[in-house]
Image: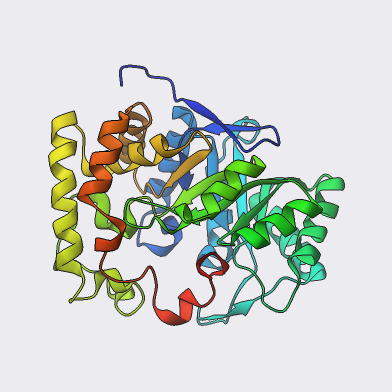
Amino acid sequence: MTSTSFPTRALGSTGLTTGAVGLGAEMMSNEPLSRETSVATIRAALDAGMSLIDTGDFYGMGDNEELIREALRPGDRERTILSVKFNGLKDPAGRFVGIEGRPEHVKNFLTYSLRRLGTDHVDIYRPSRLAADVPIEDTVGAISELIDAGYVRHLGLSEVGSETIRRAHAVHPVADVQLEYSVFSRGIERDILGTCLELGIGITAYAVLGHGLLTGDFQRDAVDPRFKGHLPRFDAENLPANLALVDGLRVVAERRGVSVAQLAIAWELAKSERIVPLVGARRPERIAQALEAAHLVLSAEEVAEIERLVPASAIAGTRYAAPLMALLDSER
């Protein structure tokens, strides 16, 4: 933890190298943050070596992409890996209305993203969810054409299962799959993680802090109203049990002289060299904490201890409410 340089990792086997931890930018468009704070956070991340920035064209209805464009200074684009998700449809009120994967729409989505980001290409382009009515081969085929044309550098996927990963990979090499993975969400260990390792595909892990539960300072009476009914692990009947599990992790964190959040990130990094955790840092000071976590090396014994303290079977509540779980090909 004494080095000031940010460690790097190969993200999959398609030639991408990124900082060992990436920046998830979604919350910058969902929280009442000042524009200046968000811009400063993105710039602090890049200056620290956190080169991967993950966004979605539907984050803030395009605002998130425009924010990133504003934050990038002259010379920043060359050292930035932009990962963009698409195909989540919303109405003018911001309500989710569906998933779109038809090839002509894929190309249309990218056209607007390039304009909002102020760039001539994105580095990783991925559907946010599997479109049930469109073969994955069609969606991936459109991205492959965009890669051939130079508008996209690498193909990514998000929240898909092993069969879909294999079908997509047969059309075009997949750089990485974005999945929820944390001490509290270990479903990908059943088979998806093994599939990605077999095929040489990286994983960008989101919600590594359990949507806030694994920060170590979450307050029982501070549940975001948006979480109620949306994230069952925050429901009144589940929250006490989950916070008790976090208390167990605090013992290990204090022994190492780090926060619970840093311990959770380090656990993720220790699981595989193929994994790049995404942290939803919202302020510049969080970047320094992520840098420390990236240098924290856990022993195999510490990883096992963490998993004994938080057995997957002990997590109370599912990842999402039933309607949202039904959209996850990765959970089928």
Residue at 19% x, 29% y: name it: 256
Residue 36, horizontal then vertical, whole percent: 41, 47
Relative to 270, is 154 above or below? Answer: below
Residue at 31% x, 21% y: name it: 1
Q: Can residue 332 be seen here? A: yes
Residue at 80% x, 54% y: name it: 171
Side (left or right) of 247 relative to 107: left
Side (left or right) of 87 relative to 312: right
In this figure, which colouring scheme has been used for the structure?
rainbow
Side (left or right) of 39 relative to 97: left
Residue 128, horizontal then vertical, whole percent: 59, 63
Q: Quadrant of residue 150?
A: top right
Relative to 318, is 190 above or below? Answer: above
Residue 47, horizontal then vertical, whole percent: 47, 29
Q: Quadrant of residue 180?
A: bottom left
Q: Can residue 67 be seen here? A: no
Q: Nearer the viewer, residue 279 or 161?
A: 161
Residue 73, horizontal then vertical, whole percent: 57, 35
Relative to 7, is 193 above or below? Answer: below
